[in-house]
Image (cartoon, rainbow, N blue to C red):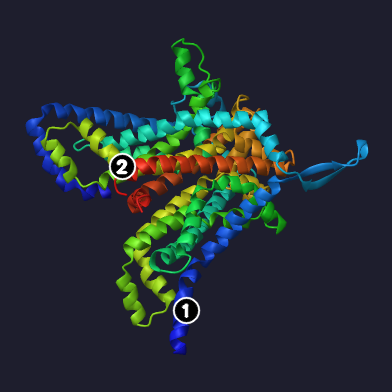
Amino acid sequence: MSATLQASPRTGDRQFGHRHRPAAQRRPRLAMIVLLLGALYCLTPVAWVVIAASKTPRELFTTFSFAPGSGLVDNLANLSGYDAGQFWQWGLNSLLYAGLGAILSTFVSAMAGYALAKFRFRGREVLFSVILAGVLVPGIVLAVPQYLLLASVGLAGTYWSVLLPVIINPFGIFLCRVFAAAAVPQSTLEAARLDGAGEVRIFGHIVLPMMTQGLVTVFLLQFVGIWNNFLLPFIMLSDQDKYPITLGLYTFLSKGAGDTDLYPLVIIGSAVSVIPLIVLVLVLQRFWRADLLAGGLKG
Amino acid sequence: MPTSTGRRIRAAATPWLFATPAIVFFTLFLIIPIGYAIYLSFRGFRIHGGGAFGRRVQAFVGFDNYLAALTDPEYVAGLGRVLIYGVIAIPSVLGLALLFALLLDIPRVRAQGFSRTAIFLPYAVPGVIASLLWGFLYLPSTSPITYLAERLHTGPLDFFGYPALYFSLANIALWSGVGFNMIIIFTSLRAIPTSIYEAARIDGASELQIAWRIKIPLVAPALVLTGLFSVIGTLQLYSEPATLHPMTATVTTTWVPLMKIYEEAFKNDNLGGAAAASVVLALGILVISLLLLRLFQRRTFGDNV
């Protein structure tokens, strides 16, 4: 989206380049080749897994990797049949953890970011500094004490044990503060207050809609972060029916360590779980406000 | 008067009310766990009484756990491996991300939209699955690279040997991370007003000179941000080696510090040791992050202050 913003000034110097520096025409071709090589590098493993997913176990180890096989339907049936459809349960779990977790997290971050950006109050700078320091705390190192604490209140091993810790996202709060400061004019808030609107109403009806674009970015970041998270569910969960997809596939692979029969299952499972995520990214890319991230550090 | 005071109190309370959920979750899931980890790191089992009848009793053990962690050859070796991996992975990720971002920013290049999306795609693939994909591409029995190498009668390729393993792991990080960092750098390139380059172009500066002299210095803050996140992420390396572990014996169960911490906590029932090792790792990450910020902040923001 930002690419379109500056299209016009750049077309201006296009003619200039044509006229004065014919040598410059060669460079964009090299640039294109390097970019396409990068694209090839990034797409190859995805292409491989999609092709490998179509192979029967025998074909997997005997035919050339990028030759399609004949076992796609069987593999899918095996995957669905594994432990009475447990794979799909994992998918639903991932969707629950990432979807609900990211929604709650974004909402909590939006409120805190709004408070930090739009109110002057004693302790504001201290609060902000403490939260900012939280960005530097390696989240994963917290997982062991979090497990012990949740276990002591009987929550370890439940859905809550994976959902609750991901609600706090210091970087999300930081981004929401930056975004609230930029997107919500003080005068609008004053006008709403003069009209007698309550603070909750102002937040829900005026502030949240104004922050939507930034909130989508915070949501997407957190969604992908939770979806990709491995160590937290790995430590918290023991019941396989509650596993997210990453942990489930890891279990497949660990079981298949000595036993290559499970490899096709791992491969088809990876392919099936990667495709919806890729579609999601392609669709949501237009809402992605990377400038918010890039601008974050300047504040 | 009373209404005015009431309103003032309410006005003072409003921001705190909005921040309350964040403060509660921050306290429950960050501050208390950190405090608990520090407490645990000073606790351990002491044997009371002598001989075979000694009882194991939990007690305050001072810095014993820290001493044990820092003198544990496996933990220290794990730290070393993470550092070697980071030295390979971080510059490659950031360097290539910067290169791609600069190429995307050159006018008149074809296939920019396609390349940008394709390079960004792996961001959506979880680390575990990325490691699975690459793992199969490395594994001799399924690898197309090994297949081709055999057809060409070159020697067998071992992606899991030393030092190849470091590069194999760094490659997974590169594949997963280059697109995200590219987008952040590219976006801050787009935020630079084009008028800045126009003067340079009129003076006959090449795209290379413009990139080197103007663009890179101006996107330095974005590079610091991406570098910082790369460092924090690298030291927490876990899911990639854990996923490769079933595929190769070279990746042991304690290959990186976090794998060691997990094993201490959940397999050896040594919570104190695991907590001390976590605290050491967290402090290391904090110190390196602050050093980086200080080092680059002066260089990046020095002119503005």
**Picture quarter containing residue B91?**
top left
Please tell me the numbered disc located at residue A209. none
Q: Which amino acid lies under the numbered mark 2 shown in the image of this protein?
A: Val
- Residue at screen point 62% across, 57% down: A160
**Which residue in the rendered view is the most extreme toward the left?**
A19
Quadrant containing the N terminus of chain B in the rendered view: bottom left
**In this view of the protein, which residue sits in the foreground, B263 or B214?**
B214
Name the residue beneath numbered marker 2.
B219
Please name whichever residue, A10 or B19, is drawn nearer the observer in this view of the structure.
Answer: B19
User: Residue at horizontal 27%, vertical 49%?
Assistant: A2
> Circle 1 — which element?
helix
Q: Same chain for marks 1 and 2? A: yes
Please determine whether, in this image, residue A216 is positioned above or below residue B117: below
Chain bearing tag 1 is B
- Image coordinates of residue A62 in percent, x first then y, are 52, 21
Graded by Cα atoms within 10 Å as few (under 14), some (14 to 19) or many (20 or more), the crowding at tag 1 reads few
How many C-alpha atoms fall within 10 Å of the one at disc 2: few (<14), some, or many (≥20)? many
Horizontally, is A13 left or right of B289 in the view? left
Residue type at mark 1 is: Arg
**Disc 2 is attached to a residue of which chain?**
B
Point out residue A235 in the picture as x, y percentages from the top left corner.
64, 46
Which of the two residues, A133 or B257, is positioned nearer the viewer here?
A: A133
Residue position marked by numbered label 1 in the rendering:
B10
At horizontal 56% and vertical 36% (from top left) the residue drawn is A266
